[in-house]
Amino acid sequence: MNEISFDDFLQVELRVGKVVSAEEFPEARSPAYILHVDFGDEIGVRKSSAQITDLYSADELIGKLVVGVVNFPPKQIGPIKSQCLVTGFHNGDGHVALCVPDRPVPPGTKLL
């Protein structure tokens, strides 16, 4: 494991966002959704491709709070430009479980 400094960690903008829409992404190489995530007034709504179809339906994602990296450069994924990285962990079956706050917090809140 590579060690990083605390200053390195502080450069990563991890923010809470609320999923406002989720739709299937048929052009993706692996099954995925296109998510629109609201990160509050300062950042706004960002688009992301998320390979989370094994554990989540598009409908159940609406309104869900997620944790995303908002300061990566946009990345072209097929026909869409992903503007943030929604975080998660692989479970024992290799499916992605979202990283989520366990209590309600306002969209845009920064991880401390």
Image (cartoon, rainbow, N blue to C red):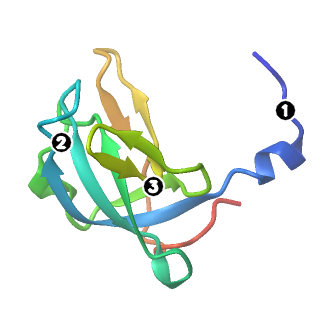
Q: Secondary structure at mark 2?
A: loop
In the rendered image, which quarter is residue 59 located in? bottom left
Q: Residue at x 46, y 71 (%)?
A: 39
What is the x, y in percent for residue 2?
80, 20
What is the x, y in percent for residue 4?
84, 32
Q: CA distance from mark 1 to mark 3?
A: 24 Å
Residue 21, disc = none
Horizontal side of residue 96 vs 7, given as left or right: left
Relative height, residue 27 to residue 58 (above, below): above
> Foreground residue, 27 or 66?
27
Give the labeled residue for mark 3: 83
For the C terminus, give its image quadrant.
bottom right
Give the labeled residue for mark 2: 56
Q: Nearer the viewer, mark 1 or mark 3?
A: 3
Q: Residue at x 55, y 62 (%)?
A: 15
Q: CA distance from mark 1 to mark 2?
A: 33 Å
Q: Amino acid at mark 1?
A: Ile
Give the labeled residue for mark 1: 4
Q: Amino acid at mark 3?
A: Gln
For the N terminus, give its image quadrant.
top right
